[in-house]
Amino acid sequence: MDNISVSTTDVRIERHANQLSRQLKLLREKLFPPLSQKTLRTFSSGEAAQMIGVSDGYLRQLSLDGKGPQPELSQNGRRSYTLGQINELRHYMAKLKPKDALSYLPWRRPGEKLQTVAVTNFKGGSAKTTTTLYLAQYLALAGYRVLAIDLDPQASLSSMLGVQPEFDLSDGDTLYGAIRYDADRRPLKDIVRKTYFDGLDLVPGNLELMEFEHETPRALSDRQRPGELFFRRVGMAIAEVEADYDVVVIDCPPQLGYLTLGAVCAATSLLITIHPQMVDVASMSQFLLMTSDLLSVVRKAGGDLQHDFIKYVVTRHEPFDAPQSQIVALLRSLFSDDVLTATILKSTAIADAGLTKQTLFEIEKGQVRRSTYDRALESVNAANGEVLAGIHKAWGRT
């Protein structure tokens, strides 16, 4: 009580927040010098060849012939490519072999609509942000043009993609800037920023996103402009940059608010994360009931709720845990094919990479135990591969 009288709770919490922010900034400067910006590792010629779909020998010959981007050569003669160079090679191969262009450069074609995947669950701890991040990076590595939208005011996705919300963003630098109700609304293309991950752009998030939750009730009460159909605003903003991307991945906030409803209405597909613990599954039951009730109201108001697919993804899965196995079996018996066959494992490799704000795609393989790395990456790739198959099906690709 004496401490509170000296310094009120709000002042103390603000001081703690500032201290933590400064420490995080120092940590970022230490991890990513000299400009405090994240960079992506280079990929060996073998990795690059596998990503492009050619042989390592073919890439070597291109390099010797001076065709395409030239790799970096180490002292022992090993070649490595940046992701940007790999994407250049994809374009090169698509022009060289136009009949096989789709296998080298998988961008969506005329008639294939933009795919928007909303990753959602209103309970924290379901690995929603991690699932969003790994899906976005997986698609970018596969050669797609990806936009990640951070709709969570906590902005963990932005932080993992190299943006520190407290220092790097100004007013209007989040999606809120493109969906606000006043005259300060900005075009989304002015908010989108490139990331260090070639092919992956970001609409960052921070606490200002909460302004949309506060302003929408006032807009709904305005008889002249009754909310301007708030549930369409996210989709309308995304439509402004539709031509620039193949897939949009949205990290929804852990609550059923106006932002989440806007994301669900803008989405062409939904990915619902599930941590296989009984308390999480019980919470998800309430989430689904509330979502159904709210979306029925939105549908009656004119919202488009036709989704190409709705999938549940089991996250932080421990396959040798008997209670978890029972819950996964229950989910499969209830939802059948709507549950992804692959589950994302709980792994020290994923956790260790996250300590330095990296993913398994970013760290050097030697940083964690090889068997642990391979097992975790296999589970991530299998789950994301199923999501990509759903996108291809929506596009009409075999």
Image (cartoon, rainbow, N blue to C red):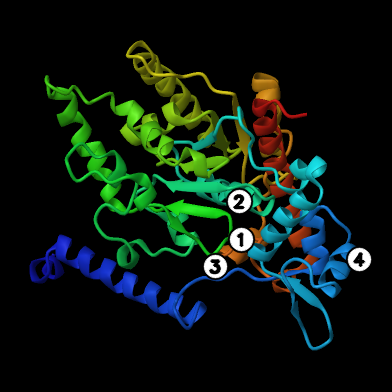
> Which residue is label 3 attached to?
355
Relative to 98, does residue 371 appear above or below in the rendering? below
Q: Specify whether residue 330 is in view.
A: no
Mark 2 lies on residue: 134
In the rendered image, residue 66, in percent from the top left (x then y), is placed at 80, 73
The reply to whether callout 1 and callout 2 are in contact (CB within 8 Å) is yes
Crowd band around label 3 with a 10 angstrom C-alpha radius: few (<14), some (14–19), many (20+): few
Estimate the spatial distance between the alpha carbons at disc 4 and disc 1, rounded to whole Å.
29 Å
Residue identifier under label 4:
57
Please report contact status of discs 3 and 2: CB closer than 8 Å, yes or no. Answer: no
Q: Quadrant of the C terminus?
A: top right
- Three-letter code, disc 3: Leu
Q: Nearer the viewer, residue 111 or 281?
A: 111
- The residue where tag 1 is placed is 359
Q: Kindly indicate whether the residue at mark 4 contacts the one at mark 3 (C-beta within 8 angstroms).
A: no
Q: In this view, does 364 lie above or below 153?
A: below
User: Which amino acid type is marked by label 2?
Assistant: Tyr
Residue 275 locus on image (x, y percent): 58, 40
Q: Do the residues under discs 4 and 1 have CB atoms within 8 angstroms?
A: no
Dot 1 crowding, Cα within 10 Å, few <14, some 14–19, many 20+: many
How many marks the image carries: the answer is 4
- The numbered mark at residue 257 is none
As shown in the figure, which amino acid type bears the numbered disc 1?
Thr
Q: Residue furthest top?
A: 300
Q: Is residue 330 or residue 23 the one in the foreground?
A: 23
Tell which circle, 4 or 2, labels the residue nearer the N-terminal end.
4
